[in-house]
Amino acid sequence: LGLESDLRRAAATGEEFALHFQPKVDMPQRGFHRVIGAEALIRWHHPVRGLVSPAEFIPLAEETGLIWEIGAWTLREACGRLAGWLAAGLDIASVSVNLSPRQFQDARLVNFVRDVVDRSGVPPERLELELTEGAMIGDIEKAVTILHGLKGIGIRLSIDDFGTGYSSLAYLKRFPINTLKIDRSFVRDIVQSATDPAIVNTIVNLADSLGFDTIAEGVETEEQADMLRRQRCTRIQGFLISRPLDVDAFERFLAENV
Ligand code: G
Ligand code: G
Ligand code: MN
Ligand code: NA
């Protein structure tokens, strides 16, 4: 209960939150990784408890409805940072923001996202929203309508943790999305697994056929990256490239890598 009232207070101002950014890179057959974007990940600096993980407070925010205020802060902050980087000449292709199921199902979502993008002045195609399959189960017709509404703003859409949820191929073909983010559970054991390379390869082929991109999450070693490359997955994100970085560290990373 203490944490809930603290979160309510934090959500009211946003002052205790910060965004960290984890680079996403491409992985050509040879040569260097190039930064293609970054994922924004929220952090809560609690005045007494110190850093509280989103794994702890996002579920609480969902249960209490505070996710709307927190998500609004996150989206504004991400667009504000992106606008600042572009104005400073740091040519970052996209910044993604995670949406939890309750945010996705909120009737205010499409208008709110349009409004934040408009006010920030960022080109909409530089903003990406990451949704999980779980957000879209239930009323599929409604989910497709919301996705088209978001698409109509001109932003990019990805399915996060892909392969762990329930989206059937019949649904997937109706989703106007750009990217499948291959869940890190398929990456973790890919070097020694008898099955995981085939699963990744199948996801990449499926994405190709449907006109989607892919990116593998949770890549921690060169060996995993090599195996992914052999499965034709050419975009990665993970500790091998960088942990999520605070704004200063991320700006240094960009300056050295773009
Ligand atoms: O950054 P970290 O790996 O600790 O994130 C843990 C979980 O919290 C991940 O599932 C991530 O998607 C989620 N998360 C991080 N930031 C946000 C955010 O701004 N909004 C939502 N809805 N989820 C987030
Ligand atoms: O659910 P989502 O994919 O949004 O989760 C993002 C979370 O994954 C963040 O909390 C981030 O810290 C974590 N993460 C990012 N890269 C790696 C990695 O290489 N290994 C592990 N174990 N976690 C990672
Ligand atoms: Mn994500
Ligand atoms: Na994920």
Image (spheres, rainbow, N blue to C red):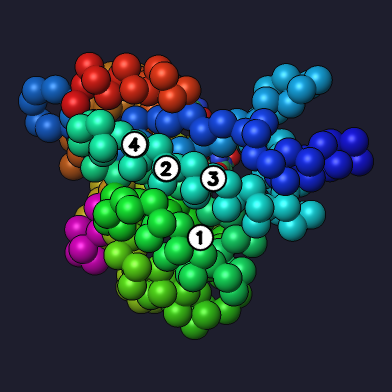
Amino acid under disc 1: Glu
Q: Secondary structure at mark 3?
A: helix
Circle nearer the N terminus (3, 4):
3
Q: CA distance from mark 1 to mark 3?
A: 21 Å
Q: Nearer the viewer, mark 1 or mark 4?
A: 4
Let me know if residue 183 is in the magenta part.
Answer: no
- Residue behind mark 1: 133
Can the viewer see residue 141 in this picture? yes
Rate crowding at label 2 as few (under 14), some (14 to 19) or many (20 or more) other CA atoms within 10 Å.
Answer: some
- Circles 3 and 4: CB distance less than 8 Å? no
Closer to us: 93 or 114? 114
- Residue behind mark 3: 74
The structure residue drawn at horizontal position 40% and vertical position 17%, both measured from the top left corner, is 249
- Residue behind mark 4: 84
Q: Nearer the viewer, mark 2 or mark 1?
A: 2
Farthest residue toward the right?
A: 1
Q: CA distance from mark 3 to mark 4?
A: 15 Å
Q: Nearer the viewer, mark 3 or mark 4?
A: 4
Circle nearer the N terminus (3, 2):
3
